[in-house]
Image (cartoon, rainbow, N blue to C red):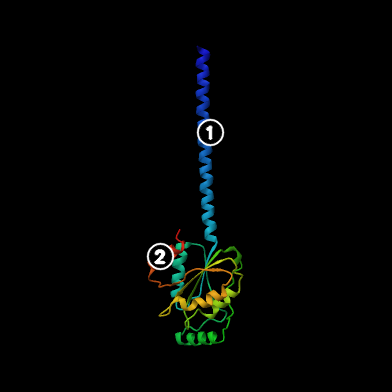
């Protein structure tokens, strides 16, 4: 009888220890999965670049709003010779650049462009298209296989007017539907990003 009792106790103890071991293993696997998910989230952020050219500050505000929502890295596109601060002088420079299909030299350089899968590219509409400095930026890198997401700000034009230029310069990339954005209309920006699948 004692032997039977001892045998029962041994079996019960074995089952208890086994359950504890499985619980620890399950917890360990769960922790590992959570860590991996966090790492994947961080990696996703690192694969997004938001590059923008802004003259009056409106495009910059939209770029910052997008950055706040989707994460990733953000960089301001700047020319070696800054555009005039005066509006009318700036429009004359922009007009001359467009007529000459110029490529203004940039002081902005992205040394690790190969790290990014998605590039948001923002700009004001000048003379019914993107500034020629955007052409310089897009032509400076191999964008093959990347996803390009354009957005712009404008007083009256739509982003559609700039899309022929963007599509031509990004022929080996996937160009997503762009947005003519207003810095004050955050809900519209969020809806657009949600439709494109970029809301976290």
Q: Nearer the viewer, mark 1 or mark 2?
A: 2
Q: How many marks?
A: 2
Sequence-first tag of 1 and 2: 1
Query: On screen, 22 above or below 132?
Result: above
Task: Reply above or below: 12 against 131.
Answer: above
Report the residue at 58% width, 77% height from top.
136
Which corner quadrant of the image does residue 182 belong to?
Answer: bottom left
Instruction: Please say if 61 is above or below 128.
Output: above
The residue at the point 51 percent across, 48 percent down is 34
Q: Residue furthest top?
A: 1
Q: Mark 2, residues whose alpha carbon is within 10 Å: few (<14), some, or many (≥20)?
A: few
**The quarter of the displayed image where residue 180 is located:** bottom left
The foreground one among 50 and 129 is: 129
Image quadrant holding the C terminus, namely bottom left
Q: Position of residue 61 (x, y in %)?
A: 44, 71
Cα–Cα gap, marks 1 and 2: 47 Å
Q: Position of residue 134 (x, y in %)?
A: 54, 76
| Secondary structure category for the residue under label 1 | helix
Taking the image as shown, residue 155 lies to the left or right of residue 115, namely left
Q: Which mark is residue 56?
A: none
Secondary structure under tag 2 reads helix
Please give the name of the residue rendered at 50% of the width and 16% of the height, measured from the top-left corner. 5
Q: Nearer the viewer, residue 112 or 156?
A: 156
Circle 2 sits on which residue? Answer: 191
User: Mark on residue 21?
Assistant: 1
Neighbor class of circle 1 (other Cα within 10 Å; few <14, some 14-19, many 20+) is: few
Q: In this view of the protein, which residue sits in the foreground, 119 or 161?
A: 161
Where's residue 35, x and y in %?
Answer: 53, 48
Residue 82 in picture, x, y percent from top left? 53, 81
Q: Are marks 1 and 2 in contact (CB under 8 Å)?
A: no
């Amino acid at each position: 009888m004692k032997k039977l009792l001892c045998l029962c106790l041994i079996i019960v103890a074995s089952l208890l220890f086994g359950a504890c071991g499985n619980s620890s293993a399950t917890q360990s696997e769960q922790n590992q999965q959570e860590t991996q998910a966090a790492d994947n989230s961080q990696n996703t952020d690192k694969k997004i670049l938001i590059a923008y050219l802004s003259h009056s500050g409106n495009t910059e505000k939209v770029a910052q709003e997008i950055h706040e929502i989707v994460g990733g890295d953000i960089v301001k596109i700047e020319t070696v010779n800054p555009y005039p601060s005066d509006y009318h002088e700036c429009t004359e420079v922009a007009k001359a650049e467009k007529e000459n299909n110029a490529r203004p030299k940039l002081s902005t350089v992205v040394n690790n462009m190969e790290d990014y899968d998605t590039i948001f590219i923002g700009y004001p509409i000048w003379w019914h298209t993107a500034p020629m400095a955007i052409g310089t930026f897009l032509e400076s890198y191999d964008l093959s296989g990347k996803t390009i997401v354009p957005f712009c700000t404008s007083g009256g034009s739509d982003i559609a007017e700039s899309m022929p230029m963007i599509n031509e310069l990004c022929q080996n990339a996937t160009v997503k539907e762009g947005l003519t954005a207003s810095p004050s209309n955050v809900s519209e920006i969020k809806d657009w990003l949600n439709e494109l699948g970029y809301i976290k």
